[in-house]
């Protein structure tokens, strides 16, 4: 059986970014899980964020498909990429840098360990 992903807005955005990770702003985030399979090391769903920036260090690989808004990822080596609606990207395990939400954004995520 397949699992449909509900791509509608997530409500409420009730998860703050930890203070020690904040770079700018005080964004709230939220998600709606679609599929959680801890035994297989796979999770998917929809995630949203308000404008702001914070430090990230990925211990897993994540596929992101932007549904709305814009986000920029800045690697610790200084390289950066900006993504908007309809664009997809992979954040590999081991990526370290800053996630910056430039416009309120919503994405589909698929995470594998």
Image (cartoon, grey):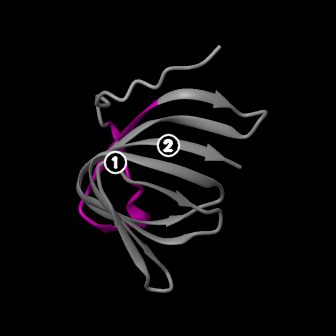
Element marked by disc 1: loop
- Is 72 located above or below residue 67 in the figure? below
Q: Position of residue 25 (x, y in %)?
A: 23, 62
Element marked by disc 2: strand
- Farthest-out residue, top: 1
User: Which residue corresponds to mark 1?
Assistant: 86
- Is 6 located above or below residue 26 in the figure? above
Mark seen at residue 97:
none
Q: Position of residue 73 (x, y in %)?
A: 40, 68
- Is 69 located above or below residue 74 in the figure? above
**Disc on the earlier residue, 1 or 2:** 1
Mark 1 closeness class: few <14, some 14–19, many ≥20 residues within 10 Å: few
User: Which residue corresponds to mark 2?
Assistant: 109
Magenta stretch in the rendered image: 14-32
Residues 70 and 54: in front is 70
In the image, taking residue 27 as reference, residue 88 lies left or right, namely right
Mark 2 closeness class: few <14, some 14–19, many ≥20 residues within 10 Å: many
Which mark lies nearer to you, 1 or 2?
Answer: 1
- Is 56 located above or below residue 5 in the figure? below
């Amino acid at each position: 059986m397949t699992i449909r992903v509900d791509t509608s807005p997530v409500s409420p955005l009730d998860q703050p970014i930890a203070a020690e990770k904040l770079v700018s702003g005080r964004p709230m985030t939220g998600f709606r899980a679609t599929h959680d399979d801890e035994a297989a090391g796979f999770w998917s769903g929809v995630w949203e964020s308000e404008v702001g920036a914070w430090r990230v260090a990925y211990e897993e690989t994540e596929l992101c498909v932007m549904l709305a808004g814009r986000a920029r990822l800045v690697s610790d080596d200084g390289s950066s990429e900006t993504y908007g609606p309809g664009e997809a990207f992979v954040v590999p395990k081991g990526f370290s840098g800053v996630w910056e939400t430039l416009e309120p954004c919503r994405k589909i995520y698929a995470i594998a360990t």
